Amino acid sequence: MKLDWKIFPHKEKIGEWNVQKAETNFAGRKWIAWFSTEIPIQDGPYKFYGLPGLIVKVEDQSGFHKMELKGIKKNVLERDVLAFEFEKPIGLDYKKYQTVYKNYRRDPRANLKKMAQDGQFYVTDDAGNRLDNADYLKSQEKAVMERMKKNNNILELDLLK
């Protein structure tokens, strides 16, 4: 997905970087970004990219969602990257992704419920005693639904349409 940026001549300084203003519409919101050509990387946070420099700051017009670069440092750790083996990925277009997301919001524990029904999932207490899956899933679902109620200002508004 390519973002359609409008670049403005307005310039400022954010932290140690000289930045320039750009705007785009994405996922039902208008976004204001500040990018620096001093860092010639056409990338930024989340799904924001495609400007002629690193996006140092981006926020939606309402000010509810804001992401800002706080620093850059060289990674001095030398370690192997863990490789995870997953099932073969499936491709999703945006409409299908929207459907999957809405289904998750409706029933966030559907996959765990199915696994429990198929005998692929169970929970134990600290002593190793097996707990009732239905009770556990009900409490987990309640907790997730409460969290989603509190977090009702999702970044991508288009997902709720």
Image: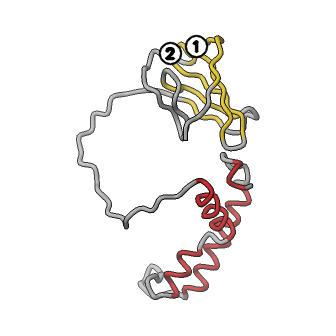
Q: Residue at x 64, y 63 (%)?
A: 99
User: In the rendered image, which quarter contains the N terminus?
Assistant: top right
Residue 98 place in picture, x, y as percent: 64, 58
Task: Kindly identify which residue carries mark 2.
Answer: 16
> Based on the displayed image, in which of its 4 quarters is residue 110 positioned?
bottom right
Considering depth in this image, is 29 or 89 the residue closer to the camera?
89
Q: Image height check: is 80 above or below 69?
A: below
Residue at (46% x, 82% y) in the render = 121
The location of residue 139, given as percent across then percent down, is 63, 76
Q: Which residue is mark 1?
A: 13
Q: Quadrant of residue 129?
A: bottom left
**Element class at badge 2:** loop
Q: Amino acid at mark 2?
A: Glu
**Left or right: 56 as drawn, with respect to 41:** right
Task: Look at 48% across and 16% down and name the residue there.
Answer: 37
The C terminus appears in which quarter of the rendering?
bottom right
The amino acid sitting under disc 1 is: Lys
